[in-house]
């Protein structure tokens, strides 16, 4: 059953059938109520209760929301008993004891509420998005061999020598992680995002080639989000 086939005020059967088609699981009156849907019944005008109907001389749809009334329905009662509802002006009111009784087939559920429930259930069924963990301090950069593997083939100069010299965009004020070579020169790390942006800006390495590097080398995968965010901020 499609959304357009669900009437404005759907019966219990129509609501259950429609939701079953949306969720591929069976539905019952108890499950509708347990999922937070409010049942309604149409109350024809009764002159014996002028305060309840007010100007609604044709009657109105009354909600069933009192816990005792809904629990009775969910438990499998043979009919509907309404002890508390809202009057025609949407003011909560207690009905004269023992309350109003109606047949089960008179129950209705609002289309917008049924559709909202279906949307909520679809959202809950979606897999949790993968959380990208930002690079930790111990993973604040990539080593010399990784730099060469990822970017040496994209430049027209001796990248290995440039890394050894530590000058220009490869110095402490650039892509090299500050303090990473404090104990040993071979322990130096470079931020691949800063490095790639520098290669593009200073050495005119084409951006498509740099983008391809972040999608090709496994050691750059964890930097891909940072790289894409930087491009977005720079309008590239």
Image (cartoon, rainbow, N blue to C red):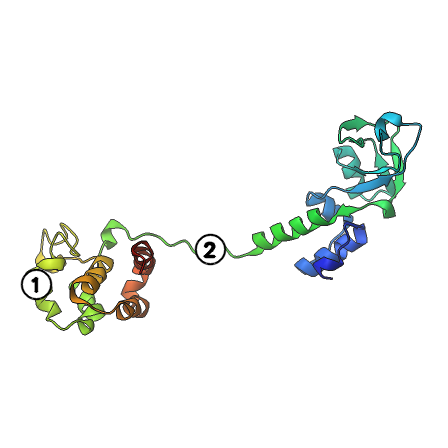
According to the picture, the residue beneath numbered tag 2 turns out to be 129
- Which residue is found at the position 19% from the left and 65% from the top? 147
Residue 90 image position (x, y, % from top left): 75, 31
- Report if the CB atoms under discs 2 and 1 are less than 8 Å apart: no
Residue drawn where x is 73% and y is 58% of the image:
4
State the image coordinates of residue 174 (x, y, percent, origin top left): 15, 55
At horizontal 21% and vertical 64% (from top left) the residue drawn is: 200
The span from disc 2 to disc 1 (Cα, nearest Å) is 41 Å
Residue at image mark 1: 164
Secondary structure at badge 1 equals: helix
Q: Is 52 positioned to the left or the right of 224 in the image?
A: right
Q: Is residue 26 visible?
A: no
* Residue 100 can be seen in this image: yes
Element type at marker 2?
A: loop
Q: Which circle's residue, 2 or 1, is located before the other in the chain?
A: 2
Vertical side of 225 occupied by 106: above or below: above
Q: Position of residue 6 (x, y in %)?
A: 75, 55
Mark count: 2
Q: Which of 133/90 is in front? A: 90
Near mark 2 (Cα within 10 A), the count class, few <14, some 14-19 or many ≥20, is few
Tell whether 167 sits left or right of 223: left
Residue 53 occupies which quadrant of the picture? top right
Dot 1 alpha-carbon crowd within 10 angstroms: few under 14, some 14 to 19, many 20 or more: some
Q: Residue 145, located in which quarter of the rendered image? A: bottom left
Question: Quarter holding the N terminus?
Answer: bottom right
- As drawn, is 120 to the left or to the right of 193? right
């Amino acid at each position: 059953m499609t959304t357009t086939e669900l009437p404005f005020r759907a019966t219990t059967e129509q609501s259950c059938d429609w939701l079953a088609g949306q969720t591929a699981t069976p539905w019952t009156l108890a499950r509708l109520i347990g999922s937070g849907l409010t049942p309604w019944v149409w109350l024809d005008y009764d002159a014996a209760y002028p305060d309840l109907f007010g100007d609604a001389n044709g009657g109105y749809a009354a909600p069933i929301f009192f816990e005792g009334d809904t629990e009775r329905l969910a438990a499998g009662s043979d009919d509907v008993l309404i002890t508390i509802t809202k009057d025609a002006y949407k003011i909560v009111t207690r009905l004269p004891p023992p309350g109003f009784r109606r047949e089960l087939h008179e129950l209705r559920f609002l289309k917008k509420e049924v559709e909202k429930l279906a949307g909520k259930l679809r959202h809950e069924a979606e897999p949790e998005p993968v959380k990208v963990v930002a690079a930790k301090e111990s993973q604040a950069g990539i080593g010399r061999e990784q730099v060469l593997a990822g970017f040496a083939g994209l430049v027209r100069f001796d990248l290995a020598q440039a890394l050894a010299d530590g000058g220009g965009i490869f110095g402490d004020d650039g892509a090299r992680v500050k303090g990473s070579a404090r104990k040993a020169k071979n322990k130096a790390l470079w931020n691949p995002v800063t490095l790639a942006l520098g290669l593009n800006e200073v050495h005119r390495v084409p951006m498509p080639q740099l983008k391809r590097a972040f999608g090709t080398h496994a050691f750059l995968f964890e930097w891909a989000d940072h790289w894409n965010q930087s491009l977005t901020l720079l309008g590239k």
